Image (spheres, rainbow, N blue to C red):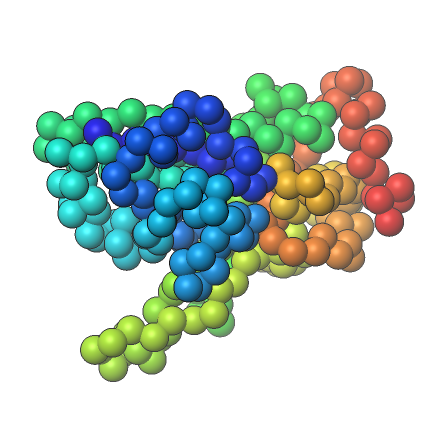
Amino acid sequence: MLYIIGLGLGDERDITLRGLEAVKKSQKIYMEAYTSLLSFGLSSDGLSSLEKFYGKPITLADREMVEEKAGSMIEEAIDNDIAFLVVGDPFGATTHSDLVVRAKKLGVKVEVVHNASVMNAVGICGLQLYHYGETVSIPFFTETWRPDSFYEKIKKNRALGLHTLCLLDIRVKEPTFESLCRGGKKQYEPPRYMTVNTAIEQLLEVEEKRGESVYGEETECVGFARLGAEDQKIVSGTMKQLESVDFGAPLHCLVIVGKTHPVEEEMLEFYKYEAAS
């Protein structure tokens, strides 16, 4: 059996009872290690608050392992109970859908244990989840690569009066350009986590370039940091206001606010920029 288990957003205590039972009976535990490990106390030597909590060792599975070498993990699940732990909910990323497909094609039983994810936890700000349009990803710009495909999706959402959740880039274990050119052993860049501030800066740059007035400095947004953790930070304000806010440690995400209902507005007041600052 392959168990794919969501851990939620806070810390090791956020696992569900069903998820914990599956972990306890698994012969081997893998932990997705290329999205968010920040609140789970994982360190480079593999020791973690999760291992202490479960009383079992955890094998860190980086992007390369999950996307290119998942076959061996799936084969282990033919005759053993194997747990694959995912921060948030297992289906917050297409990689995990691929894992399920590959396992089922090999005849491996799969059980998914769901948990909270950013996709529903953003509801804490008061913006109703069924008033959201398509979610977009904002990647880090480089000198030579400044994609803006998200602009059209935001444009469609705003035309319909819908809110837009922007998921911000995470760069973990990315090979350096030099090591890719050289070949041989890969060297990796330091981890990078996009901030709300950087996201807004890039969004405004794209608006200036496109000039279609889809949004601007006075557009209302909500910035989130460490959503689901005890020290989470939520601030509502214009893009210009949020660009100056120190949201602190990652992970961050951003919502571009669409047409609001009075109930939504009342809830947003608790997170207004003036009060938060």
Q: Is residue 81 left or right of residue 8?
A: left
- Percent coordinates x, y for residue 162 in the rendering: 61, 27
Q: Is residue 270 left or right of residue 224?
A: right
Q: Quadrant of the N terminus?
A: top left
Q: Residue at x 53, y 44 (%)?
A: 167
- Percent coordinates x, y for residue 229 in the rendering: 64, 41
Place residue 28 in its image quadrant.
Answer: top left
Q: Residue at x 56, y 48 (%)?
A: 39
Q: Nearer the viewer, residue 254 or 208?
A: 254
Q: In this orientation, does residue 201 appear? A: yes
Q: Is residue 143 above or below residue 40?
A: below
Q: Nearer the viewer, residue 202 or 226?
A: 226
Q: Residue at x 38, y 40 (%)?
A: 85
- Percent coordinates x, y for residue 190 in the rendering: 47, 70
Q: Is residue 204 left or right of residue 108?
A: right
Query: Furthest residue to the left?
Result: 106
Q: In this orientation, does residue 212 appear? A: no
Q: Is residue 185 left or right of residue 277?
A: left
Q: Nearer the viewer, residue 54 or 151?
A: 54
